[in-house]
Image (spheres, rainbow, N blue to C red):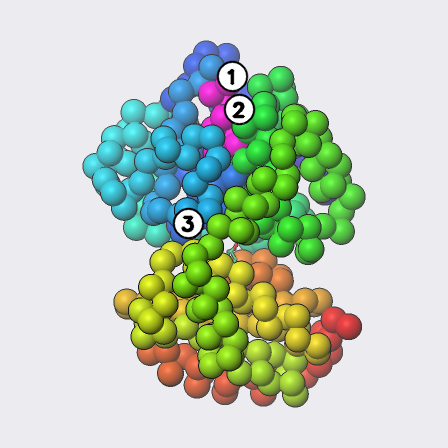
């Protein structure tokens, strides 16, 4: 990872000041393990340092992240927009985590946009929007959780890191690297994990909380999708899976059930571009993953109103599932040369 900018860290320290501050931490909409882990990890450290901290999430997140210390104190805009506005009103400082654009705050966008007090953004997505007072952006970093650990350490908060904070930060790094499968070419990530392990965290327990916590319905849904709802295009090194509302209903789908589905096609020999389309009430949510150099964030931005990282991105389509699939199939030939050139194996 690149060195942290000393001036930026100084500005971060100045915003936190010497007296207790009222801080609101906001992760991105539909929070994933990194968003929840970095938010709860950072909240814990700042609380330990004497600050008054609230984590404010746009909406709920899956149950397999609801074990980290502080999870039961999270406020949700989706449950009470009034309380969310009040928390922001009464705060001195806003910390945004794990997103690069205000659009990633969903229905809470205008509240965040109109926040007039100091704000900080700590993130690892490329092309950050320049909205905060202090911007700490490191797209080369494995996860926001790892970056948060470095920032807190550099800003003199290391003595306030404890086991509970380390658990949450570890969870963020673990989930954003697919259990240390990708985004881990920088030795520093493993050094960070080594540091976190020194706090006595049980990495086996954490892994199990996240990955061995699914319902039988979810496993059956996965089997069904792999059988019935996956198309493989060997000539394009690509595969797509789709999850209609009908299928979701059949398997009592709950948020989080399709977590990880998009990765499965990548384990087919020769496939290095995988897509999952999930039908929602008013749109289709797209998830993209790749191995090697095929930049799915560019693919998502250009064709599916989205963005993200080079190897993991997402987007939204305001069309039917079948039209979305048609669009995807029609796009593949345009990318054939690139998909062949960026072959990972
Ligand atoms: P997932 O496929 O797990 O939902 O998202 C993978 C990554 O893609 C996220 O970490 C995020 O960076 C990005 N992403 C997902 N959905 C969207 C979206 O609708 N818009 C943008 N700009 N990025 C997204
Ligand atoms: Mn992340």
- Residue 95 lies in the magenta-colored region: no
Q: Is residue 72 left or right of residue 80?
A: right
> Is residue 82 in view?
yes
- Real-space Cα separation, disc 1 to disc 3, in angstroms: 29 Å
- Residue 44 lies in the magenta-colored region: yes
Range of the magenta residues? 39-49
Helix, strand or loop at label 3? It is loop
Considering only vertical position in the picture, is 48 above or below 318?
Answer: above
Q: Say few, some or many: other residues with alpha carbon within 10 Å of mark 2 (under 14 / 14 to 19 / 20 or more).
A: many
Taking the spot 48% from the left edge, 64% from the top edge, the residue there is 219
- Real-space Cα separation, disc 3 to disc 2, in angstroms: 23 Å
* Quarter of the view holding residue 281: bottom left
Q: Is residue 237 left or right of residue 284?
A: right
Coordinates of residue 341 in the picture (x, y in percent): 73, 78
Taking the spot 43% from the left edge, 41% from the top edge, the residue there is 66
> Is residue 96 in view?
no
Q: Are marks 1 and 3 in contact (CB under 8 Å)?
A: no
Taking the spot 65% from the left edge, 87% from the top edge, the residue there is 235
* Res 157 label: none
Q: Nearer the viewer, residue 20 or 126?
A: 20
Q: Which residue is mark 3?
A: 62
Q: Which residue is mark 1?
A: 49
Considering only vertical position in the picture, is 47 above or below 1?
Answer: above
Question: What quarter of the picture does the N terminus occupy?
Answer: top right
* Total marks in image: 3
Q: Say few, some or many: other residues with alpha carbon within 10 Å of mark 3 (under 14 / 14 to 19 / 20 or more).
A: some
Please state which of the two labelled residues, at mark 1 or mark 3, is closer to the viewer.
Answer: 3
* Quarter of the view holding residue 149: top right
Q: Say few, some or many: other residues with alpha carbon within 10 Å of mark 1 (under 14 / 14 to 19 / 20 or more).
A: some
Q: Are marks 2 and 1 in contact (CB under 8 Å)?
A: yes
* Res 45 label: 2
**Mark 1 vs mark 3: which is more N-terminal?**
1
């Amino acid at each position: 990872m690149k060195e942290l900018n000393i001036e930026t860290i100084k500005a971060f320290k100045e915003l936190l000041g010497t007296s207790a501050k009222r801080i609101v931490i906001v992760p991105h909409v539909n929070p994933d393990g990194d968003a929840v882990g970095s938010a709860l990890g950072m909240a814990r450290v700042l609380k330990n340092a004497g600050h008054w901290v609230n984590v404010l999430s746009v909406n709920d997140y899956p149950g397999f992240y609801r074990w980290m210390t502080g999870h039961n104190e999270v406020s949700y805009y989706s449950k009470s927009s009034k309380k969310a506005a009040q928390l922001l009103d009464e705060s001195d400082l806003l910390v945004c985590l794990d997103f690069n654009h205000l659009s990633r705050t969903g229905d809470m966008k205008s509240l965040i946009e109109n926040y007039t007090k100091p704000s900080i953004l700590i993130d690892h997505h490329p092309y950050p929007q320049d909205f905060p007072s202090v911007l700490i952006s490191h797209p080369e970093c494995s996860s926001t959780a790892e970056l948060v650990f470095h920032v807190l350490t550099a800003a003199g908060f290391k003595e306030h890191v404890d086991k509970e904070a380390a658990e949450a930060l570890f969870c963020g790094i673990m989930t954003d690297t697919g259990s240390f499968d990708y985004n881990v070419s920088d030795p520093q990530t493993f050094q960070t994990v080594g540091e976190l392990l020194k706090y006595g965290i049980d990495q086996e327990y954490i892994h199990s909380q996240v990955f061995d916590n699914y319902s039988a319905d979810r496993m059956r849904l996965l089997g069904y999708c792999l059988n019935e709802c996956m198309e493989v295009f060997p000539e394009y090194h690509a595969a797509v899976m789709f999850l209609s509302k009908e299928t979701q209903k059949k398997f009592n789908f709950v948020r989080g059930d399709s977590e990880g589905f998009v990765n499965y096609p990548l384990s087919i020999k020769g496939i290095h571009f995988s897509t999952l389309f999930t039908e929602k009430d008013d749109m289709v949510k797209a998830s993209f993953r790749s191995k090697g150099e095929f930049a799915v964030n560019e693919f998502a931005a250009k064709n599916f109103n989205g963005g993200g990282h080079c190897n993991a991105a997402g987007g939204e389509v305001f069309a039917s599932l079948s039209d979305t699939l048609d669009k995807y199939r029609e796009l593949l030939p345009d990318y054939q040369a690139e998909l062949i050139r960026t072959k990972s194996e």
